[in-house]
Amino acid sequence: MGRKFLVALGGAALALSLAACSGGGAGSGGDTSSDKPSDLTIGVSMPTQTSERWIADGNAVKSKLEAKGYKVDLQYAGDDIPTQSQQVDQMITQGADVLVIAAIDGTALNSQLQAAAAAKIPVISYDRLIRGSKDVDFYVSFDNYKVGVAQGTALLVGLGLLNKDGSKGTAKGPLNVELFAGSLDDNNTQYFFNGAMDTLKPFVEDGTLIVKSKQTTPEQVATLRWQQETAQKRMENLLTSAYNDGSKVDGVLSPYDGISRGIITALQNAGYGKGAKKLPVVTGQDAEIASIKLINDGVQNSTVFKDTRLLAEQAVNAAEAFLQKKQPQANDTETYNNGVKVVPSYLLPIATVYKDDIKATLIDSGYWTAEEVAAGQAKK
Ligand code: BGC
C-alpha cells in the first residue's frame, strides 16, 4: 500500500496525509520510487463510454499498466461533470499514486487538482488538456492543430479542389459547405477548428467555398459533448433553413466520426445519396469502426486516425516516470498553455484515412480487422 489520504470534502481542496504508511510507502509527498508496482495505484478517469475511442483508451492504459504490475482504478464518467469530479475525488481519497485524466470539461476539475497537488499526486492530462490550473504535470496527446489541418485538407481533396499531393485539383467553385465543431469545453475543439479554418480560409475568401448558412463562429457551429444526435438536429435545421431553395450542400467539415454519422443521417433523411443527389463530402476523426465501414462503402469521405495504443503507451511511460520520481520525456514544451502555465507535452502524429488507406493504416497495423471493417462493428 503506497499511502492513504483523507481528503477534506466540500471541494476537496485540502488533502491531509493521515497515515504515511510503512514499507517505503509514499505518504504525502513521499517517495514511490522504491515501491513495488503492486503497491502502487494509478487512477484513470475517462469521460464517456458512448464513443469507442475512450473505451479503447481506457482498456489500453489499464492493460499496459497491469502488465507492468501496477494496480489500476479505471472509471468512466458518463459525460457528466459532477460524476467525473466525484470519481477523481475518490481516487485521491483512496490513495492513488498518479492520476491520468481525460476531462469532460477542461476547466471543471480545479479543486480536485488542488487536492491532488496537496497530496503530491502527479496529474497527467490525457488527450484533453486540463485548463486554468498549475497542478497539471504532463500532457499526452496528438498534434491537435494538425488534426484540424488534416480535416480541412480532406474536405478540399474530397471536393476536388486539391489533390492528395497538395497540388491544385480540377474542381471549380462555388461549392456550398457547412461547418461543425466539437464541444467548446474541450480544449481540443479550438485546435481542430482553427487548423481546419486556417486551411479552408483562402477558399472561403476567394468565393470558391460558400458557407450558405453563414454560421461560421465556434459558438454557432459547436456540438455540446460531441453528441451525434445534436449534430443530426443541427444538420436537419441547416437543410431546412439554408437549403430550401433547391440548392445543395457539397461538403461538411466534421470534427469527429460520431458527429459525421449524425450529419450523414440527416442528409440521407433529406434524400441525399439517392439518384443524382450525391452525398456531400463529410470528414471525421477517430477511425471509429462504424465510420470506417461508411468510408469503405463510399458514404463518408475520410477520418483522422489517432492511434490510441500509442497514446496509452505514452501515458504509461509518463506515469512510470513520475512514480520513479523522474520527469517524463516531453517532445513539446511550447504549444499547450493551459491559461496558467505551459504544460510539458508528448504529442503523437496523426494520419488521414481515405478509403484507399484503410488497409495499410488500420488493418495492417492491427487496429481493425478486415471482418470488422466489412461488418462495421468491433468484435470484442
Ligand atoms: C478527442 C477526439 C474525440 C473527441 C470526442 C476529443 O477531445 O481528441 O479524438 O473525437 O474528443 O470524443
Image (spheres, rainbow, N blue to C red):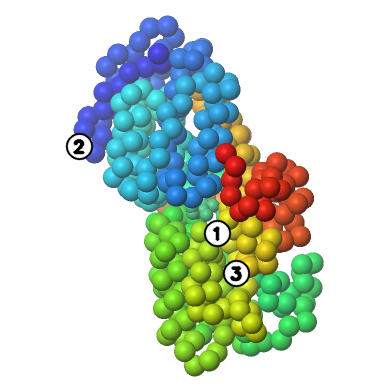
Q: Quadrant of residue 153?
A: bottom right
The label on residue 10 is 2
Q: Which residue is mark 1?
A: 257
Q: Residue at x 44, y 76 (%)?
A: 236
Amino acid tagged 3: Val
For label 3, the residue is 282
If the image is split into quadrants, where does the N terminus sit? top left
Q: Is residue 308 above or below residue 147?
A: above
Instruction: Please give left or right for residue 347 compared with residue 90 in the image.
Output: right
| Residue 132 appears in the figure | no
Q: Amino acid at mark 1?
A: Asp
What residue sits 61% from the left and 53% below the top? 376
The quadrant in which residue 379 appears is top right
Amino acid tagged 2: Gly
Give the distance between the C-alpha atoms of the residues marked 3 and 1, in whole angstroms: 9 Å
- Is disc 1 surrounded by few (<14), some (14 to 19) or many (20+) residues within 10 Å? many
Report helix, strand or loop for mark 3. strand
Q: Secondary structure at mark 2?
A: loop
Q: Earlier in the sequence, mark 2 or mark 3?
A: 2
Q: Nearer the viewer, mark 2 or mark 3?
A: 3
